[in-house]
Image: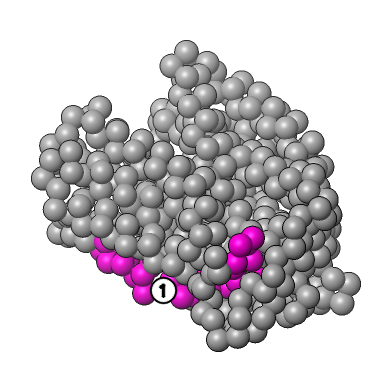
Amino acid sequence: MTTSPTAGPPPLGTRDAARRARVAVALVFGVHGAVGGTFVSRIPWIQHHLGLSPGQLGLALVMPAIGSSLAMPLAGRFVHRWGGRAAVRVLLSLCCLSVALPVLAPSLPVLCLALLAYGATAGMSDVAMNAQGVEIEQRLGRSIMSGLHGMWSAGGLVASGIGILAAHQSFDPRLQLAVAAALLLALAQPVCAALPDLRAPEQAEEPPRFALPPRSSLVIGMVGFCAVFAEGASMDWSGVYLRDVTGASPTVAAAAYTAFALTMAVGRLAGDAVIRRVGAVRSARLSGAVATAGGLLVVVADRPALAIPGFALIGIGVAVVVPLAFAAAGRIGDNPSQAIAGVATVTYTSGLVAPAIVGGLAQASSLTVSFGVVTALSFALLLGAGALRRAEVRIPGGSVPVAAAPGSPGKREPVAGEPSVGEAVTRGSGPNSAAG
């Protein structure tokens, strides 16, 4: 699923076809997020049901990340062989079904195996749907990846809210997750059927069964690593930070995560408008500046009224970075799904190690020092933003051609019925320049 340096990807056809493709892929992201939110809401029950210590639960919760890391490099071959639509449909269906497994586990070893399977299916479907999103974004000629990840966040928030309500009503989690798996599976079928059947060119070489990340994706992956480190640290430690460092009550401490999650979701849903206006690189730099400001506010906070806005700013700041990293990866080489898998593997490794590193630093020194490191990594987003240059897309009114070589002129192929757009960028213009 690649494009030539001059022609650009073929359009999606009519305006209605383009709109249907965008809505379908957004709903795919929402379903995938809902699977994750459904599982997370029942983690406390799993711990109580199996009598797990915090250390045992921590071991079990590492398994999804390990399963994802091992399985994501396989996704490129599936997408190439089956096509984007079929790959997303099969892998997302398996992901929906796998969410019912953890609550059925009778012991810690079986739980670990169930979570490995859950992580593997979630990771592979994540790569396939991001590859589909990048391809649709290229063919639409405008940024949509941030909004797609916003739909993922929204799906997770809605599903976790339903799970919390079910827990409050003492609903049996085994029945709840079985019903949720069936409903999400049923919803995934028409949603995936509405995706365009995007396939790699016939001359494209089939990727190996297990593809290592391309070197060109590693720098992009490291930018995503910094963003996900700040995200994971804030999600897992914000409540503890407010309680132990600022003396907040348990209720107020819980508000830190809520502020972070909501601002991240809103930031992603609104992020495409910013990216279209100022470009991917400038958006990433702005994100790094906002996240750094939030980290500094957290570090100096001596009361909850300062720390909570700090965590909210971190959420806003890192919101668009991972979507931009996937968009940039999807423009590398002849097999975008392979590059996306590489970036995802590097990026999500951060989510695996961040909580442990923050905890280790807090044990050796303090949580304030830990979030000093988070702030430094947020600042690194400013320095590494140029690696996301490939994420620039062509937008009406002036933009950068997706596949054009730097400094070369290029035109966007309009969707049928859409007014044409003139030259997107002139020779010598920078990747962030926009006319109009």
Color encoding of the figure: one colour
Please tell me whether residue 401 belongs to the stretch shown in magenta: yes
Query: Residue at left 31%, top 67%?
Result: 379
- Is there any visible trace of residue 244 in the rendered image? no
Q: Horizontally, is 36 left or right of 1 in the view? A: left
Quadrant where the N terminus sits is bottom right
Give me the residue at 43% from left, 71% from top: 385
**Magenta highlight: main SS:** helix
Vertical placement of residue 212 versus 20, above or below: below
Q: Could you say whether the residue bearing mark 1 is in a helix, strand or loop?
A: helix
Q: Which residues are magenta?
A: 373-402
The residue shown at (69%, 77%) is 410
Looking at the image, which is closer to me, 2 or 18? 18
Q: Does 214 sit above or below residue 96? A: below
Q: x, y percentage for residue 116?
A: 58, 49
**Residue sitting at x 55%, y 86%:** 428
Q: Nearer the viewer, residue 59 or 206?
A: 206
Q: Nearer the viewer, residue 49 or 173?
A: 173
106 within the magenta span = no
> Which residue of the protein is positioned furthest toward the left in this rendering?
302
Q: Position of residue 433 (x, y in %)?
A: 51, 73
Q: Where residue 49 sits: x, y (%)?
A: 46, 27
48 horizontally vs 408: left or right = left
The answer to whether one can see residue 313 in this image is: yes
Query: Residue reaching furthest top?
Result: 169
Q: How many marks?
A: 1
**Residue type at the position of mark 1:** Gly
Q: Nearer the viewer, residue 276 or 328?
A: 276
Residue 288: x and y in percent read 36, 63
Crowding at label 1, few (<14), some or many (≥20) Cα neighbours within 10 Å?
some
Give the residue pinned by disc 1.
384
